[in-house]
Image (cartoon, coloured by chain):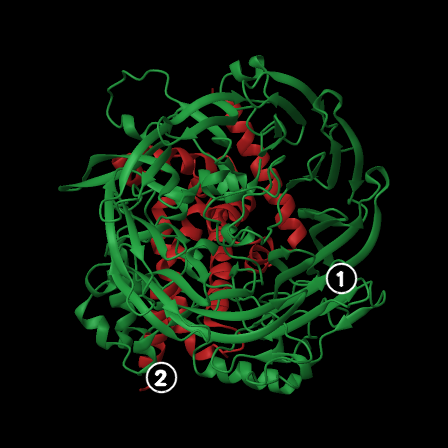
Chain colours: A green, B red
């Protein structure tokens, strides 16, 4: 089972917080300095315990019920992504120059307290959403051709890597440590043409791109050979030992003119962790993140080399970034390298351009012309002013640092990147869909403050418009106080924003006047949407969860709580912008029903012209619907189905289920509970070629007639040895 | 500002910024509701007391996690000496049970199936959404050990889901 499935399942636990009572008491204890002075021993706190007096039991688990609504604390901490602009970077950014200068910068940043805000463990991507960054969704989705579907992307013309791709005759699939190439059209004679095994190459393929000539496989790897410097040295205080293996991003480009015998054209490797990629025609752009062990640097125990990369178009050796080419963002020093790489797939003579920055980023949005990297930055105003205790007096609760979003803009052109500008917005962006570019203007929706906070700390939601130099031209602030953004979609001069706390306000925002955007209308309905897909210029499809309200007893009082139920599809009519309407609504299953689509837009197959809507879903159903026992709404259903739901969608009839496709046998589905959930027969993607619908799992590719879903053929994919 | 006040302020800031995540980690990794808050409290008091010795060679967050790690080691050792089996969390504790949030009782209960290292890894990787490498750094393990331990943990939990029908 995919780890994200586990994360989703255990989501409730990730939102548990230290009980307020405990917080207040410990805060008080930490405030009383004398106590500590007399009790300096680090061994025993026995003497302190009574003063702090936290009762052992009596945790009030307030907040735990707000399953759907609590923000994930950790996710708000930014990760760093550094893009490297090579030789001719913009002159505005200063050069790192030398290792000594790096040390000085880090030391200064630490002394200024600005390093504290960064999360320094690893250079990985914080949120799973960032891994699958998409750009702007075209207003009307249309495939590359009328004959077959392509990956559902944010911005038309800007391709995003995925686990499955098709070219209208073949299916290319990341399958464990392999990439499978299967001929699926004609569907009567499907066969596996090729299986490329990456086990021995020590690469774990993640995603791929396919075009007429090339297949690009992007994977994770590890290199140990490049870090010979004191790899095993023990830290003096016995704390972290350095990670000896350096994670790398591997990109392998194949010539696929002969599918049965693909030839490797080029191999690239970037030190760091894969953040996102985009492909625009034959240009490929990659963003990676390399964590800096700056503890080791300041400590002098390790000498950290600048990140390396490898491009077989140049030679077979390792190329190290030179400090003379690494740039930094002066007011935002982070212990991370952000690397942005660009290459042209059609020009093997053009070396990969690799730009390295000291800095960070975690969400990536790309239009056809520009790439934006967003990173959170904690700003603690009180700390800076040197009066940290002032605010503590009015409120017992903890003061949270404010998070801003720093955005870096890079121009893209035929496999080259160039740093353009930097801007800053209050609040945090949710994912790639929180950002957009239209006619040179950058737009972003953010959530500021704490979701559960009150008064000044209460969350607000905002939309900002920035010009091409990332200077703010207009904004709307304080949308839906106390709620947070669940999904955003920009379409031309409109923004659709879904916030949630108890009901789902769906906002329509007009961005036509870049100086004064305004809210045109709002709709409040139960449930929420995690993903918004434009249907046409006046209709939006929302995918999320249905919710019900229930009162819960808490100590002496009761509280209204929202509980998510089954998966919800909704079609919103925004033609009357002042009064958006929910035209149609469909709920699948009961509590526990889930779909990858709610986290990853690439799981969606949508074709307006074909009235076709399909996605993989795991359905949970409660057998005894009449049971009126208490807490019924909290009850999870039994898993009864995994597979593709295929809908007809049109404006007069709404969602009509055309049928379901599963790779599980009837017998497997009858098996009580969920032992089939973790097997390889979970459908991941649905595509169509001509009049045939294909569902793809790790174990099978199944072909069904698109019109009536009658099964045509099944291709079994043998398990990897 | 004298040193003591400075330490208090620093500890308070640490607590404000990281109190919840440390709590989450201690609670789910140890699976011991009775002691969780006391342990969290001790960790921050320890941070307060040793602030003057903090050499700012890492971020305070990294430093706080190393304190957490070491403190938990002590706690575990002590519990083992006292043969206090609460640590492996065989009983449902009243504070949770009273309020009966079906959702997370079920989830929290399922963690009791895991060994201590498995819980630690599971908490970091799944509940706290840390990457393999981050978890390795926090635990002071190799990334490989993290991966293998997580794999076993997930296998066990899968087994649970199948068997309890």
Q: Callout 1: residue from which chain?
A: A
In the image, residue A331 above or below residue B33: below
> What is the number of the mark on residue B3?
2
- Indicate the position of residue A497 as horizontal and vertical percent values: 33, 51
* Viewer-closest of A154 and A237: A154
> Which is nearer the eye, B158 or A95?
A95
In the picture, residue A656 is in which quadrant? Answer: top left
- For residue A576, what is the image quadrant? top left
Q: Quadrant of the N terminus of chain B?
A: bottom left
Query: Which element type, helix, strand or loop, lies under badge 2?
Result: helix
User: Does A171 appear above or below A621?
Assistant: below
State left or right for residue A98 relative to residue A542.
right
Count neighbours of disc 1 (C-alpha within 10 A) and say few if under 14, some if 14 to 19, many if 20 or more: few
Question: What residue sits 13% from the left and 42% below the top?
Answer: A556
Outermost residue toward the left in this view: A556
Q: Are there few (<14), some (14-19), or many (20+) residues within 10 Å of tag 2?
A: few
Q: Which mark is residue A224?
A: 1
Q: Position of residue A467 (x, y in %)?
A: 42, 72
Q: Is A563 drawn above or below residue A233 in the view shown?
A: above
Q: Identify the chain of the residue marked 2, using the numbered disc in the image.
A: B
Residue drawn at 62 percent across, 35 percent down: A148
Locate residue A225 relative to residue A570 in the image: left or right.
right
Q: Is residue B51 above or below residue B2?
A: above
Picture coordinates of residue B163 (x, y %)? 52, 22
Disc 1 is placed on an element classified as loop
């Amino acid at each position: 089972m995919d780890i994200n499935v586990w994360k989703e399942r255990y989501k409730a636990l990730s939102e548990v917080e230290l009980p307020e009572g405990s917080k207040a008491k410990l805060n008080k204890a930490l405030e009383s300095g004398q106590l500590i002075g007399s009790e300096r021993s680090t061994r025993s706190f026995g003497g302190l315990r009574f003063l702090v007096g936290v009762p052992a039991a009596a945790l009030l688990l307030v907040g735990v019920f707000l399953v759907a609504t609590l923000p994930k604390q950790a996710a708000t901490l930014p990760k760093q992504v550094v893009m490297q602009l090579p030789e001719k970077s913009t002159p505005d950014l200063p050069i790192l120059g030398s290792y000594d200068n790096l040390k000085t910068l880090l030391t200064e940043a630490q002394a200024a307290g600005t390093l504290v805000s960064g999360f320094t463990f690893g250079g990985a991507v914080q949120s799973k959403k960032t891994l699958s960054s998409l750009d702007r969704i075209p207003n009307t989705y249309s495939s590359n051709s009328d004959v077959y579907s392509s990956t559902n992307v944010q911005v038309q013309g800007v391709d995003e890597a995925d686990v499955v791709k098709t070219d209208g005759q073949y299916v290319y699939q990341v399958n464990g440590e392999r990439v499978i190439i299967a001929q699926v059209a004609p569907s009567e004679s499907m066969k596996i043409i090729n299986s490329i095994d990456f086990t021995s190459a020590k690469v774990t393929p993640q995603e791929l791109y396919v075009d007429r000539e090339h297949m690009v496989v992007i994977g994770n790897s590890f290199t140990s050979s490049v870090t010979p410097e004191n790899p095993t040295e023990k830290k003096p205080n016995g704390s972290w030992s350095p990670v000896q293996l350096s994670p790398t991003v591997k990109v392998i480009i194949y010539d696929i003119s002969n599918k049965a015998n693909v030839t490797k054209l080029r191999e690239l490797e970037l030190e760091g962790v894969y953040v996102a990629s985009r492909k625009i025609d034959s240009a490929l752009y990659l963003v990676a993140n390399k964590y800096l062990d700056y503890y080791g640097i300041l400590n002098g125990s390790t000498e950290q080399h600048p990140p390396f990369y490898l491009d077989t178009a140049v030679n077979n050796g390792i190329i190290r970034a030179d400090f003379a080419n690494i740039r930094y963002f002066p007011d935002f020093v982070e212990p991370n390298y952000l690397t942005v790489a660009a290459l042209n797939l059609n020009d093997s003579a053009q070396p990969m351009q690799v730009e390295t920055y000291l800095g960070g980023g975690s969400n990536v949005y790309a239009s056809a012309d520009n790439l934006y990297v967003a990173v959170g930055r904690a700003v603690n105003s009180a700390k800076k002013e040197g009066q940290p205790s002032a605010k503590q007096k009015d409120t017992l609760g903890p003061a949270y640092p404010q998070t801003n979003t720093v955005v870096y803009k890079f121009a893209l052109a035929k496999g080259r990147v160039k740093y353009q500008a930097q801007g800053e917005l209050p609040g945090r962006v949710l994912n790639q869909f929180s950002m957009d570019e239209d006619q040179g203007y950058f737009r972003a929706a953010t959530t500021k403050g704490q979701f559960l906070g009150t008064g000044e700390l209460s969350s607000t939601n905002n939309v900002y418009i920035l010009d091409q130099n990332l200077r703010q031209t207009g904004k709307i602030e304080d949308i839906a106080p106390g709620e947070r953004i669940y999904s955003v979609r920009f379409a031309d001069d409109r923004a659709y924003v879904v916030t949630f706390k108890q009901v789902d306000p769906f906002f329509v925002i007009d961005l036509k006047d870049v100086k004064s955007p305004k809210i045109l209308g709002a709709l409040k309905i139960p449930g929420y949407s995690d993903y918004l897909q434009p249907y046409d210029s006046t209709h939006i499809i929302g995918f999320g969860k249905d919710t019900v309200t229930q009162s819960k007893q808490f100590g002496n009082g009761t509280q209204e709580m929202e509980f998510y139920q089954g998966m919800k599809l909704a079609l919103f009519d925004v033609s009357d912008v002042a009064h958006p309407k929910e035209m149609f609504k469909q709920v699948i299953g009961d509590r526990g029903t889930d779909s990858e689509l709610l986290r990853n837009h690439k799981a969606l197959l949508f074709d307006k012209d074909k009235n076709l809507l399909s996605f993989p879903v795991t359905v949970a159903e409660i057998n005894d619907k009449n049971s009126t026992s208490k807490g019924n709404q909290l009850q999870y259903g039994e898993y009864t189905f995994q597979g593709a739901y295929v809908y007809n969608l049109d404006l007069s009839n709404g969602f009509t289920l055309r049928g379901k496709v599963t790779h599980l046998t009837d017998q497997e589905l009858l098996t009580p509970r969920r032992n089939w959930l973790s097997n390889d027969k979970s459908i991941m993607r649905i595509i169509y070629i001509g009049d045939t619908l294909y569902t793809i799992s790790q174990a099978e590719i199944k072909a069904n007639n698109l019109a009536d879903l009658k099964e045509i053929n099944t291709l079994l994919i043998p398990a990897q040895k | 500002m004298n040193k003591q006040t400075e330490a208090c302020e620093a500890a308070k800031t640490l607590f404000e910024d990281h109190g919840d995540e440390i709590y989450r980690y201690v609670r789910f990794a140890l699976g011991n509701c009775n002691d969780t808050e006391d342990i969290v409290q001790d960790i921050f008091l320890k941070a307060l007391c040793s602030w003057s010795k903090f050499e700012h060679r890492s971020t305070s967050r990294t430093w706080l996690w190393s304190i957490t790690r070491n403190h938990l080691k002590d706690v575990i050792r002590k519990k083992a000496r006292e043969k206090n089996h609460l640590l492996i969390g065989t009983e449902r504790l009243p504070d949770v049970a009273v309020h009966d949030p079906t959702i997370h009782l079920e989830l929290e209960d399922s963690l009791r199936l895991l060994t201590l290292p498995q819980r630690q890894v599971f908490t970091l990787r799944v509940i706290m959404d840390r990457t393999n490498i981050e978890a390795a750094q926090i635990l002071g393990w190799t990334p490989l050990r993290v991966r293998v331990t997580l794999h076993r943990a997930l296998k066990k939990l899968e087994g649970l889901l199948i068997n309890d029908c």
